[in-house]
Image (cartoon, rainbow, N blue to C red):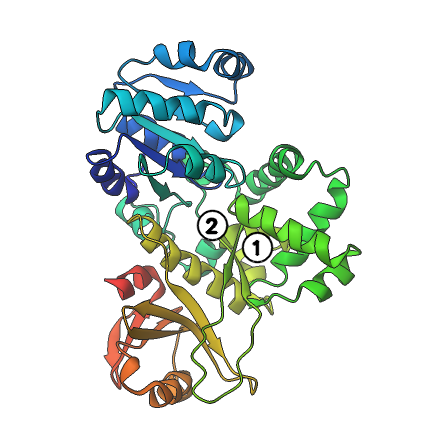
C-alpha cells in the first residue's frame, strides 16, 4: 500500500472526534486507507444489498454488531443510519469509534450536517499526489507520462494501461453514480456532456455555451455540473473579488481533479500525442491546480483558492488567500522559462502592493530556485509552494 499523506490527519482527528467522515471520488483509496487505520475493527460496506437492507430495516441492531466501532463504507447508500449513529456516539462518549466513507456529496453531506454536527470531522481524499508517488518510488520521471497516467490508485496497483482503466471507470461512474443521483435516462448525452467539460478544463465555465453545444437546457447543464462536483470529478475555481479598479470576470474556471481522466476523455493515448497536443497546457494547469488542492485537503483544510482576471484579459492563474495576504501563482507548462514568464506576476504584484506576498511560479521543468523575488518550483515539487 502506498502511504497516504492524509493518514496522519485522520489519526489526529480520531483523537478528538468519535467519527471521521472520509469522502472523495470512487477508487481514490478511501476504503483501503480507512481499513488500514482501523485494521483491528470490523468493516461493513453498505453497497452490499444484504447489509444495506439490515441497516435500513433495523439500524439499532445493525450498529449493535459493532460495539467497539467499525468502518462503514459508502454510507450515503443508507443515510437513515446517521441519526442512530448520533445517539450511539453520544451515549458512549468515546473518541475514534467510526470511520465513515462516501463517494457522493449529495445526500451524505446534508444528512451528516443534520445528524452528526459536532460529532464528526471531515477529510476529502483525492487520488495520489506527486509527493505520495515520489515517496513510494512510483512517480513518473517525465511530466507527460504523469499527465497521461493521472493519480488513481488502481492504475499503480495493477498491471493496467491507463486508457483501459479510465474507460471502465467512466462507464461504471455513469451507470452507478449518475443514475443514483439524477435518474438520468439519456446516458449518452451525459457522457457527451462530460467530454465537453473536459475540453473546457482550465477555461471559464460558460454554461449557456456548454448547454447549446450539448443540446440541453441551461438548467440541465447547471444541474449536471453540480453532479460532477458532488462526485468529485470537477472542481470550480472561483474568481477573486479584488479588482484594483479594474472590471473582473464573474464566471468560475472549470478544472478536473485528475489530469489522466482529462487526457483519456480527449482521446490522448500516448506521450507523443500529449507532447504535441494543442491543449497540453490546459492539462498541465489542471494537474497543478489539483496537486495544490490535494495538499490542502490532505491536511483536513479547505482550499482558499481563486483566480484573478480582468476584462482586458490580464490574469493570474491562482490566488491563495493566507489571512489578509494574497499569494499569486502562475502556471507555465514549458520546461524552460523566459523573462516574459514572470511579467504577469510582476504586474499583478505592483497592483496588489503589500497584499501580495511570496509570489510563485510552477513550471514543467525540474529545478527550483528564486528569481526576482519569485519562488520558482518544478512540477515534482509543486506541493512545496504551500509549505
Assign the C terminus to one quadrant of the image. Answer: bottom left
Residue 203 point in image, percent of width and height = 58, 68
Q: Residue at x 71, y 46 (%)?
A: 190
Contact, mark 1 vs mark 2 (Cβ under 8 Å): yes
Residue 200 appears in the picture as rendered: yes
Up/down of 379 relative to 56, above or below: below
Q: Nearer the viewer, residue 159 or 317?
A: 317
Number of numbered discs on residues: 2
Q: Residues within 10 Å of mark 2 (few under 14, many from 20)?
A: many
Left or right: 366 in relation to 313:
left
Where does label 1 land, which residue?
A: 263
Describe the element under mark 1 as helix, strand or loop: helix
Up/down of 9 relative to 31, above or below: below
Left or right: 286 in relation to 206:
left
Q: Which mark is residue 150?
A: 2
Q: Residue at x 71, y 55 (%)?
A: 219
Q: Quadrant of residue 336?
A: bottom left
Q: Quadrant of residue 182?
A: top right
Q: Residues within 10 Å of mark 1 (few under 14, many from 20)?
A: many
Assign the N terminus to one quadrant of the image. Answer: top left
Residues at marks 1 and 2, CA–CA distance in whole angstroms: 9 Å
Q: Nearer the viewer, residue 4 or 40?
A: 40
Q: Residue at x 43, y 27 (%)?
A: 82
Residue 114 point in image, percent of width and height = 44, 36
Describe the element under mark 2 as helix, strand or loop: loop
Residue 39 appears in the picture as rendered: no
Amino acid at each position: 500500500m502506498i502511504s497516504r499523506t492524509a493518514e496522519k490527519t485522520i489519526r489526529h482527528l480520531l483523537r478528538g472526534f468519535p467519527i471521521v467522515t472520509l469522502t472523495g471520488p470512487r477508487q481514490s483509496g478511501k476504503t483501503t486507507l480507512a481499513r488500514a487505520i482501523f485494521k483491528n475493527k470490523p468493516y461493513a460496506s453498505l453497497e452490499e444489498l444484504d447489509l444495506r437492507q439490515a441497516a435500513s430495516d433495523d439500524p439499532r441492531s445493525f450498529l449493535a454488531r459493532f460495539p467497539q466501532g467499525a468502518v462503514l463504507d459508502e454510507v450515503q447508500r443508507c443515510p437513515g443510519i446517521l441519526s442512530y449513529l448520533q445517539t450511539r456516539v453520544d451515549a458512549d462518549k468515546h473518541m475514534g469509534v467510526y470511520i465513515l466513507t462516501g463517494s457522493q456529496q449529495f445526500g451524505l453531506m446534508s444528512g451528516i450536517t443534520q445528524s452528526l454536527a459536532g460529532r464528526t470531522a471531515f477529510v476529502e481524499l483525492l487520488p495520489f499526489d506527486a509527493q505520495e508517488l515520489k515517496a513510494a518510488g512510483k512517480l513518473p520521471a517525465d511530466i507527460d507520462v504523469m499527465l497521461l497516467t493521472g493519480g488513481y490508485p488502481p492504475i499503480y496497483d495493477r498491471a493496467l494501461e491507463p486508457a483501459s482503466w479510465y474507460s471502465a471507470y467512466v462507464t461504471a461512474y455513469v451507470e452507478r453514480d449518475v443514475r443514483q443521483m439524477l435518474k438520468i435516462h439519456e446516458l449518452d448525452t451525459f457522457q457527451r456532456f462530460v467530454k465537453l467539460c473536459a475540453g473546457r478544463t482550465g477555461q471559464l465555465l460558460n454554461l449557456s455555451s456548454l448547454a447549446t453545444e450539448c443540446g440541453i437546457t441551461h438548467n440541465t447543464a447547471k444541474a449536471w455540473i453540480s453532479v460532477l462536483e458532488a462526485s468529485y470529478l470537477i472542481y470550480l475555481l472561483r474568481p477573486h473579488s479584488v479588482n484594483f479598479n479594474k472590471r473582473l470576470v464573474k464566471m468560475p474556471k472549470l478544472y478536473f481533479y485528475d489530469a489522466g481522466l482529462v487526457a483519456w476523455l480527449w482521446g490522448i493515448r500516448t506521450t507523443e500525442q500529449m507532447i504535441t497536443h494543442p491543449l497540453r497546457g490546459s492539462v498541465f494547469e489542471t494537474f497543478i491546480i489539483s496537486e495544490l488542492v490535494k495538499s490542502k485537503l490532505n491536511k483536513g483544510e479547505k482550499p482558499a483558492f481563486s483566480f484573478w482576471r480582468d476584462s482586458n484579459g490580464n490574469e493570474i492563474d491562482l490566488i491563495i488567500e493566507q489571512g489578509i495576504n494574497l499569494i499569486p501563482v502562475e502556471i507555465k507548462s514549458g520546461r524552460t522559462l523566459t523573462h516574459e514568464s514572470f511579467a504577469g506576476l510582476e504586474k499583478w504584484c505592483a497592483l496588489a502592493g503589500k497584499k501580495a506576498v511570496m509570489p510563485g511560479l510552477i513550471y514543467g521543468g525540474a529545478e527550483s530556485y528564486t528569481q526576482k523575488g519569485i519562488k520558482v518550483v518544478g512540477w515534482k515539487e509543486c506541493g512545496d509552494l504551500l509549505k
